[in-house]
Amino acid sequence: MATVYIALGSNMGDRKMNIHKALRKFAECSMARVKKVSSLIETKPEGFLDQSDFINAVAEIETELPPEGLLAAALDVESWMGRKRTIHWGPRVIDIDILLYGEISIDKPGLTIPHPAMMRRRFVLEPLAEIAPDLVLPGGVTAREAAERLAGAQEGPSR
């Protein structure tokens, strides 16, 4: 059984309900047990800015599926919920990303674990630090340390 961390985001429709609905369906599809779920946070969009704010969360799950099977389950849930990939970083009813899968590192087309952008995303690090503050991330820092560093960098130098 692998411990996995996933990020979820939504900025269309009932964003909070979309997160909860996706978690339930994802647990069903991936034969996963949801162990912890962070608080929901609202964040501004990145990349494509002309869209609504997002609701984001991170969940810790346990699964016996291999990483590729877990990715397939995530994509199935996104499709089931009506996600359309029309604009890169555009509006979405649900987005599910695999952040970490145990100690595994994978880098192949369509699947990179640890998630390559997680260390620079507040909407990932803040909820991850909430549910797993002492989890050691790539680079040897804890989730709490990474979230604090990112928050400090985004605030800029103090005067």
Image (spheres, grey):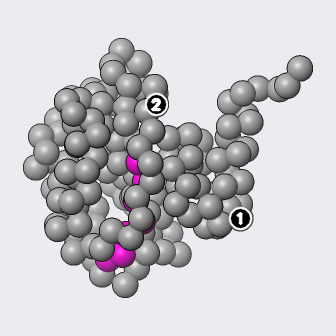
Residue sitting farthest toward the top: 50
Q: Residue at x 29, y 40 (%)?
A: 16
Q: Is residue 45 above or below residue 76?
A: above
Residue in front for this viewpoint, 153 or 115: 153
> Does residue 87 show up magenta in the picture?
no
Residue range highlighted in magenta: 57-63
Amino acid under disc 2: Thr
Q: Residue 8 at what x, y percent from top left?
A: 35, 48
User: On the picture, is 10 further left or further right than 7?
Assistant: left
Residue 118, visible in the rendered structure: no
The mark that comes first in sequence, 2 or 1, is 2
Percent x, y for residue 49?
Answer: 41, 18
Residue named by callout 1? 140
Q: Amino acid at mark 1?
A: Gly
Screen quadrant of the N terminus? bottom left
66 relative position to 116: left or right: left
User: In terms of image quadrants, where is residue 5?
Assistant: bottom left
Rendering coords of residue 38 (x, y %): 45, 54
Image-quadrant location for residue 50? top left
Instruction: Please give the residue where the numbered disc 2 appears in the rendered image.
Output: 43
Label 2 Cα neighbours within 10 Å, binned few <14 / some 14-19 / many ≥20 = some
**Secondary structure of the residue carrying numbered label 1:** loop
Question: Would residue 59 be counted in the magenta stretch?
Answer: yes
